[in-house]
Structure formats: structure tokens, C-alpha cells
Image: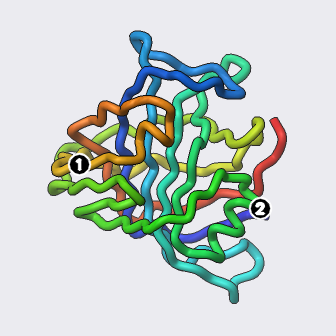
Amino acid sequence: MKFSGTERVTIELEGTFVPSRQLPVEYDLVDGRARVSLFAFHVDQLHIVGIPFVRSSYAEVLWRIAVRHRGEAAWWVTACDLAARGPAIAAKRWVRYPVRMTTVEVAETRVTSGGLDFELGAPDEPQAVEQRALLTGDLFRVPWGDYASNAHRVTVSRLTDRIGAETVGGDVSWSTSAILRKNREHRCGSAIPT
């Protein structure tokens, strides 16, 4: 099953932490610290490819940890924050995300997800987007498409984090800048065993 839609806004925020949990894959450490990447987006008109009459618009935040699997760099999803019930059921059942039902808002100037909240400045210089495979659960691969275009750096301010340590297993030191994209094509599909 394939899903498609348009992300009106996509935010990527990175942080680092000292890993304390065992994962089904190897951490991709940098100077002894693990990396976490929030992939926050608001998607419009998401639908199952071939079934255009069922559509949904909602905000989602993926908590991804940088890992290595069979020598390949990847992200491993440790949590998927959603408020919308229908997309949460689909994400859990077909994409196999560890869904956490919570308040989620993603806009060009602010992201809120449960106990995480931060504000964003105006887009600045162009920014490269790191490309990695996407893994979840007990090693399922999520078909994932990303052209990595139209990305710009934005400043991060007024960050409050009451759920990062619980989510990744260590206190997170968040970056003071993030990546902002607009109108990214959302492409993903049902998770498949690796």
C-alpha cells in the first residue's frame, strides 16, 4: 500500500543524547553521542494511491534515531506522535510506527508535540537534507521518498522539552537551528521486513 499527499510545511530538528537503551540496530554515534532527528510535518490530502476518495489532512512528528543496519546509514523510528485517530490507526497497522496519541501542531513558525514545543524564525540560507533509509519496529523498512529539495535553515527559539528523555532514553541537547521545507511531496508505504 502506498500513501501520497503534500506536506504544506516540513521541519527537521536535530539533537544529541547519551544512549542508554538497547535498540534492534546499532547506534550511529558521533563522538560517543547518539543523534535524534524530529521529522515534523503537516500533510494535506494524504490518500492511498489508487483510492483518491479517502483523504486526510493532519500533523505528525516522527522521532528518528540515527542508526546503522547492515553497514547502511538509516533512521530508526522510536515514536510517531499523532492526534488524528484515522492516520494513527493506519500508521500503526500498515507503516508499523510506534504511535503515541498526543496533541500535535506543525506550522511554519511553531511545532508542538506533547511536551515538546519550539518556535522557528524566518527561512535563511539553503540547507542540505540528510538522506537515510527509514526503519521501524523489529526491523521493518518503510518505503520512503524524499527529493530533499527547497530546504532552508531556520533558527529555533523558546524550546521546551518535557518528553525527549523519555522518548529516546537520554536528555537531548537540541540544535539552535532546524531545516524548513514547504510543499514537500509525501511518499511512503506499508512497512516491509528487512
Quadrant in the picture for the N terminus: bottom right
Q: Which residue is denoted by mark 2 in the rendering?
A: 93
Q: Is residue 169 left or right of residue 2?
A: left
Quadrant in the picture for the C terminus: top right
Instruction: Pick whichever, 185 or 180, lies toward us.
Output: 180
Residue at x-position 55% and y-position 64%: 101
Residue at x-position 68% and y-position 17%: 71
Residue 44 position, x and y percent, is 49, 76
**Amino acid type, mark 1:** Leu
- Report the residue that reaches farthest toward the right: 193
Residue 68 position, x and y percent, is 62, 22
Instruction: Pick whichever, 112 or 142, lies toward us.
Output: 112
Report the Cα–Cα distance between label 1 and label 2.
Answer: 32 Å
Q: Is residue 136 above or below residue 111?
A: above
Q: Secondary structure at mark 2?
A: helix
Q: Is residue 8 above or below residue 149?
A: below
Residue at x-position 81% and y-position 46%: 192
Q: Which mark is residue 64?
A: none
Q: Which mark is residue 159?
A: 1
Q: Is residue 76 above or below residue 190?
A: above
Q: Is residue 50 left or right of residue 163?
A: right
Q: How is the image coloured?
A: rainbow
**Amino acid type, mark 2:** Arg
Residue at x-position 19% and y-position 43%: 125
Question: How many numbered circles does the render carry?
Answer: 2
Residue 187 position, x and y percent, is 61, 59
Instruction: Pick whichever, 42 or 112, lies toward us.
Output: 112
Residue 13 position, x and y percent, is 35, 43
- Badge 1 vs badge 2, beta-carbon distance below 8 Å: no
